[in-house]
Amino acid sequence: MASKQEIRSEETKRAILTAAADLFATRGFDTVSIREIAKAAGCSHTTLYIYFKDKEALLHHLSKEPLQSLALQMEETLSKHGRTPEENLREISSQFIHFCLRNRTMYTLFFMIKASRIDVEEPEKDLQTLRNQLFGLLREAVRRCLPSDIEEEKALAHARIYFYTLHGIVGTYTHSEEPLDSLIERLAPTFALAVDVFLAGSQKIMNRE
């Protein structure tokens, strides 16, 4: 059984994370200070530093579990048998879009803040490693829809284009106040069409080459 001190410590940590998430989402990562986060959490900035060494540590902690959960979901889809690569790509795309729209207020934090190249094998930051893992899963899903003899650089280019497409879709509705269920119901056919257009375009380019 946890002691009172351990319970208070966990409550303080949760309060700091909640305050950080709210402030990052409403005011932006770069404009918020550690002191402001501590004040919103009801603790001193020295107490905050006991749990998190800086804002990047807060960002990583806020992003780690949700992004790991998404990655696991996408991995499970990729490992399914008895389905075409196109079906798996459609499902992974839907999972990615649903996740981003469900976390609209955190979307920029999860994917954009302190971001680096998505094709670097060993990024310096742990959060970027998670982001690159997600791109790698999307890349593999796209790769399976292309001819087996396609050059790796061309396959990467197609994956990047698709990655940009998904982020463009999500970015369009990041600030929308429409409920998620309503948004998905209304736009699901358009999202599905975007996948089909990408696949058709890729196939046409492959045939032309």
Image: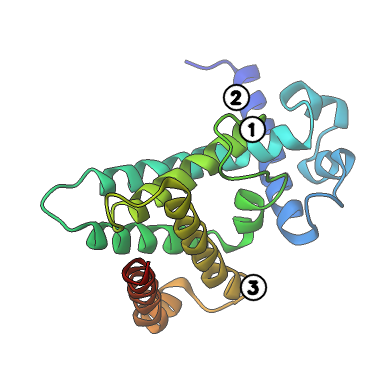
Name the residue that disc number 3 marks: 175
Q: How is the image coloured?
A: rainbow
Residue 118 numbered mark, or none = none
10 Å neighbourhood of mark 2: few (<14), some, or many (≥20)?
Answer: few
> Residue 179 or 15: which is nearer the viewer?
179
Name the residue that disc number 1 marks: 11
Q: Is residue 110 visible to the viewer in this orientation of the structure? A: yes
Residue 7 numbered mark, or none = 2
Question: Which amino acid is tagged 3?
Answer: His
Of marks 1 and 3, the one in the foreground: 3
Q: Return the x and y of residue 42 as percentages of the image width and height.
A: 80, 39
Which numbered disc flags the more N-terminal residue, 3 or 2? Answer: 2
Q: Residue at x 59, y 77 (%)?
A: 177
Image vertical order of residue 46 relative to residue 193, above or below: above
10 Å neighbourhood of mark 1: few (<14), some, or many (≥20)?
Answer: few
Element on which disc 1 rests:
helix
Question: Which amino acid is tagged 2?
Answer: Ile
Check whether the beta carbons of the residues at disc 2 and disc 1 lie within 8 A of each other.
Answer: yes
- The furthest residue to the left: 82
Q: Residue at x 60, y 24 (%)?
A: 7
